[in-house]
Amino acid sequence: MKYDFGSAVKAKTGGSFLSAGIKDATFKGVDFTQVTSQKTGDTYNTLSLKVDIDGYGEYVQNFFEPQSDERQEMQWGLSASPLDHFLIIVREILEAVNPQIIDDIDKGKVKLTGTFKQIVNTVKTLTSPFIGTPVQIKLIPQNNGFAAMPSFVARITKSGDLGISTWIIGHDLTMTPQELKKIEAAKEAAPTNMATKANVSDVLSDMENNLESEDDSDDLPF
């Protein structure tokens, strides 16, 4: 038998497990991307956020284009719309890498309007000079057994204004009681049988089911 050490030289370490919690990371940029479901063939526009997590490596999360700006009346009052959540996500990303960007937007020096793609491309332009900035991100257990950044981040105040229910990227982050509850519940739950996750389309399908859920009460600040 002939031995060739070349294949061993090229070998890479397998992906490590990414647990829930607050992680120190480095901002690596924002991009407009499209994700296609292998199960349905549907294509979704996303804001793709890339960071490098200390002790883990590259992590990418896609925030999907909101399909509605409707705020629904719930038993506790108005709930934030998908558009509201996306706007707060964008604000948190901008403030995490350079608070001056938010100040310039608030003062009208920088315009952040347009289509979803135009918004994402503008965010990319605004944040590109700050690639390499140290940040923290928040990861919460998901229904599919993985940890990911929360997508329900907005709230509507009693006066009807748009507010922030949780910070998913920034500095000196803390967990809300509801987020801590989710982490503890995940620790007590039975581990996910990954043998049942036959392919990526199954995982993407789980993501789509989470996105379609209108129950965001777990992400409310009370």
Image: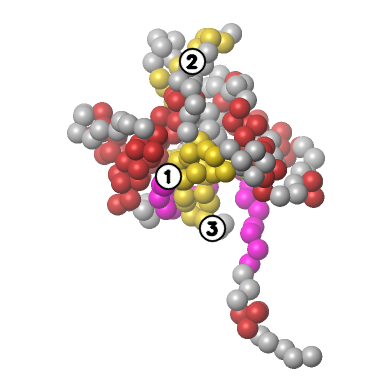
Q: Earlier in the sequence, mark 3 or mark 1?
A: 1
Please, what secondary structure does the residue beneath circle 2 have?
Answer: loop
Q: Position of residue 218 (x, y in %)?
A: 61, 24
Q: Is residue 63 visible?
A: no
In this orientation, which residue lies closer to the viewer: 43 or 124? 43
Q: Nearer the viewer, mark 3 or mark 1?
A: 1
Q: Residue at x 76, y 37 (%)?
A: 188
Q: Earlier in the sequence, mark 1 or mark 2?
A: 1
Q: Position of residue 107 (x, y in %)?
A: 21, 29
Q: Which residue is mark 3?
A: 57
Q: Nearer the viewer, mark 3 or mark 2?
A: 2
Q: Residue furthest bottom?
A: 2
Which labelled disc corresponds to residue 71? 2
The type of residue carrying mark 2 is: Arg
Local crowd at mark 2 within 10 Å, few (<14), some, or many (≥20)? some
Q: Quadrant of residue 177?
A: top right
Residue stretch in magenta: 13-32
Q: Position of residue 147 (x, y in %)?
A: 62, 43
Query: Is residue 18 covered in magenta?
Result: yes
Pointer 1 with pointer 2, Cβ within 8 A: no
Please, what secondary structure does the residue beneath circle 1 have?
Answer: strand
Q: Residue at x 62, y 70 (%)?
A: 12
Q: Quadrant of residue 74?
A: top right
Q: Residue at x 39, y 15 (%)?
A: 161
Q: Which residue is mark 1?
A: 32
Please, what secondary structure does the residue beneath circle 3 have?
Answer: strand
Local crowd at mark 3 within 10 Å, few (<14), some, or many (≥20)? few
The type of residue carrying mark 3 is: Gly
178 lies above or below 173: above
